[in-house]
Amino acid sequence: MKSSNVVWMVWCLVLVLAGCDSTKKKCEPAQGNVEGIKLDSLATALKWPKELSVTHFSGPDITPSPACLAVAPNGDVFVGVDMMGSLGKDPGKGKIVKLVDCNNDGIVDRHTVFATPDNPRGIMPVGDKVYVLHTTFSGSKASGMDLVVYEDINRDGIADGPSRPLIQNISSPKFLQNRGTDHSTNGIRMGIDGWIYIAVGDFGFHGAVDQSGKKMTMLGGGILRVRPDGTEMEIYTHGLRNIYDVAIDPFMNIYTRGNTNDGGGWNIRFIHQIQSGEYGYPVLFKHFTDEILPALVDVGGGSGTGALFMDDDTWPAKYNNVPMMADWGRSQVFIHRVTAEGASFTQADEEFFKLSQVSDLDVDASGRMFMAAWDRAGYKGNPDKGYVVRVVPSQWEYKPFPNLSELPDHGLVEYIKSGSAVARLHAQQELITRKDGEAALLEIAKDSSLPIASRVAGIFGYAQAAKSASIENLVKLVNDKPIKEFVLRALTDRARQAVNVPVEPFLDALKSSDDRLRIAAMVGLGRIGNPDVATALLQTEVPASAVVPAKGMEGPHATPNSEIIPAHIAVRSLVRLNAVEACVAAIGTENSDLALWALRYMHDTRAVNGLIEAYSATNDSKLQKQIMNTLARLYHKEAPYDGSWWWSTRPDTHGPYYVTAKWEGSEVIGDFLNQLWKKSYGRDKAMFADLNGKLRLGISQFGGEEKVEVVEVKKPKIDLNKIKNKKGQIGKSSIEDIMLALDDVKGNTVLGKQLFTRQGCVACHSLKTSEPMKGPFMGQIGSIMSKEQIAESILKPNASISQGFSSVNITTKDGKVYSGFVTGESAGVVKMRNIVGQEFTIKSSEIKEREELETSMMPTGLANSMSYEEFASLVAFLSNQK
């Protein structure tokens, strides 16, 4: 028997075992969603604008632990069920469930197990294909993460056999094995340019390979993109922490919601992603903020998850044309109202939709939005938690979306002209496959009567369909002012075709007063690859706001600074061009500041020699200091990343490198700096000490900082046994680290009982029914909550308020206010108990207002002073209370 037949038979067996069959099923409308009605968290977990209507689409019986979801343009919902969660490590617990709503009433009527990948973290349906990002396993151990594609040509809701890989190894297997997926690669989304954009967490990746055989490595997080056939993989932006998804608008503005460095508050940054931009985490974004693109805002604590740019004209205007960003940690979807400023934006964020630990959101072509709620499924998944809701405008009316493959070309064109970004994208992708698609897309691009969003879809669609043959016709459109930016972007969007693009339109755009146009030109010139354009790029002014932070001070990494963007992107393109000679030649000219900025990243002996010669050729002390700083920056470089280490949840943010290594220019630089140091005295010698400290040169005679190891340092493995009894470790650790430690540190229940009293828990909680009832009863907590849930409720009480543990405020008609827990309720009375055990009986007829509180009465930080062993003991003691 051929191996391919064996694979197919095994695949069929997997599907049968998953409870699926390979034939189409008639879809009978459901009468109701019993599981949705039963969800205990819905009463307190949902809050939404009055202009919207919400239904409980599916419950944990069908979609437990939903880590991600995506919606086909016709409304079919694909949910990634992830029973491993962020910290689980055992395979065989993932699947993608396809949900169908036959009668469009907001309740799932039919579902199938579409496929069974482990740890699904990103889904994108396009036509008969479904792109999926998921963890791979070799035996019982994670072997990496892959972007794959499934097909369902017969559209029976079940994938036609196993998946086909597009990119392999896009997350570090070592840390997937050690930690799980909490900092791994996550969401995927397709832009109108036809690229699939991938949110890479700060595990980064080593040795990722696409379908052309191209290999890449990325230290830390960022955005990776690839063509739908799995080729042309490239890094779009870099220097992000733990992003989970991307939101892409019709004009290819990309937004993410990611954390700052751990230990500094775990705050969320909302970031506009500009192609080729460097965002600095973790080594530049504190002390080298003059070199990075800053975030638009720091919104405080949270955990960013799914992202969507809402562009659908069936929605109310105030909820349309905005990035919608889910935050799992705050159980909230936020809207960021962006206002154009130069090449970027400013923003105003606001709460939009409250949903219990919301993990993802997406919208179809008729305006139906779907949101997935993790709903306290914990860090390793829970078969009894998680659900999906449907959200539509209150006056929304269903409009059927056709099978695009059955439409004529002119029908597809009408959808590209529509007010739905989803309809435009999917109609564009279908038209690209047609014989006459090129011509139709070019006509859309040319049509000045159309909205710009439709013309942009035509521009990028034509570039995808015609490939290199598109260059001639796109160049003819370059002077059409409303679309010029997008024509420039489309011309150089494919790096292997960009070498054939003329530079003249880009050089002309560099002179524009429109910063967005200038940025498109700068990025394009870097991709064309002609080093002769370096002189033009060097004429970009470095603004006064490019200020080096004072020694030991944290710079403004989350303050919008649109005026820094042109200089930053010009530098990135100069580095891509490796324009060493042009930059060296510009030293001492009016373009010196930008040239020296670019030279900081050019580890090339020509740069070193040129800088030394320029130092000797000038008597300008300010310029000499700048040159010396640039040379000192080049003394080390980042060591090649081999995937064997990660900077952990509390990285060293000193910068400018994380693991330093010397290179062939280091000795020459060291000798030159030493010669200057020997000639210096007084204040000048102090300058060398400051330089040594800031850049961690490790040149002992300069002083300023202790010498550090510089050659390919491996991060030491944390010895949990050595620190498990160290006081205060709980307060210094991320919740993920604590959860992982609980797997390895055995608690002492006797000690746990003592801690229950010592930490003050006994003041608010009773353990025996014979004791006075106070706050929530703990005598049966072990039978209600898992060890993990108990730990989370202590560490993050506001994030895990379970049924019966939520608190309420009741205001009576005579103005009295009662706060506490409801212990009993009938038609006539409500019985309550406050945190100190006082009981109240309130007549229902006397209640003026009753409000379920979003915050727990239990204060945060009660366990911060504990060691790992103490915390494990407290959790073990409570787990035994059954």
Image (cartoon, rainbow, N blue to C red):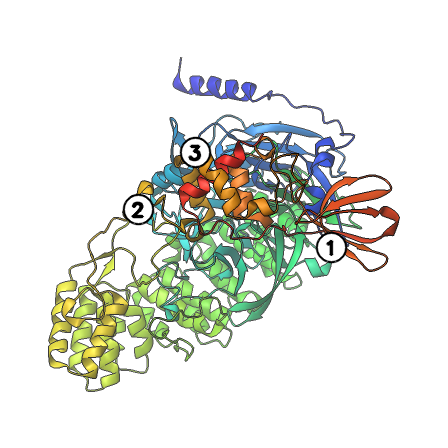
Q: Is residue 719 visible?
A: yes
From what the image shows, is residue 377 above or below residue 764?
above
Mark 1 — residue? 49
Name the residue furthest right.
845
For the C terminus, give its image quadrant: top right
Disc number placed over residue 645 in the picture, else none: 2
Distance from the alpha carbon under mark 2 to that under mark 3: 19 Å
| Badge 2 vs badge 3, beta-carbon distance below 8 Å | no
Q: Few, some or many C-alpha atoms within 10 Å of disc 1 (few <14, some 14-19, many ≥20)?
A: few
Q: Secondary structure at mark 1?
A: loop
Disc number placed over residue 871 in the picture, else none: none
Q: Is residue 157 visible?
A: no
x, y percentage for residue 747? 43, 36
The residue drawn where x is 68% and y is 50% is: 414
Going by the numbered disc 2, the residue's amino acid type is Trp
Name the residue furthest bottom.
619
226 vs 450, left or right, is: left
The residue drawn where x is 74% and y is 57% is: 316
- Please state which of the two labelled residues, at mark 1 or mark 3, is closer to the viewer: 3
Distance from the alpha carbon under mark 1 to that under mark 2: 46 Å
x, y percentage for residue 470? 48, 55
| Badge 1 vs badge 3, beta-carbon distance below 8 Å | no
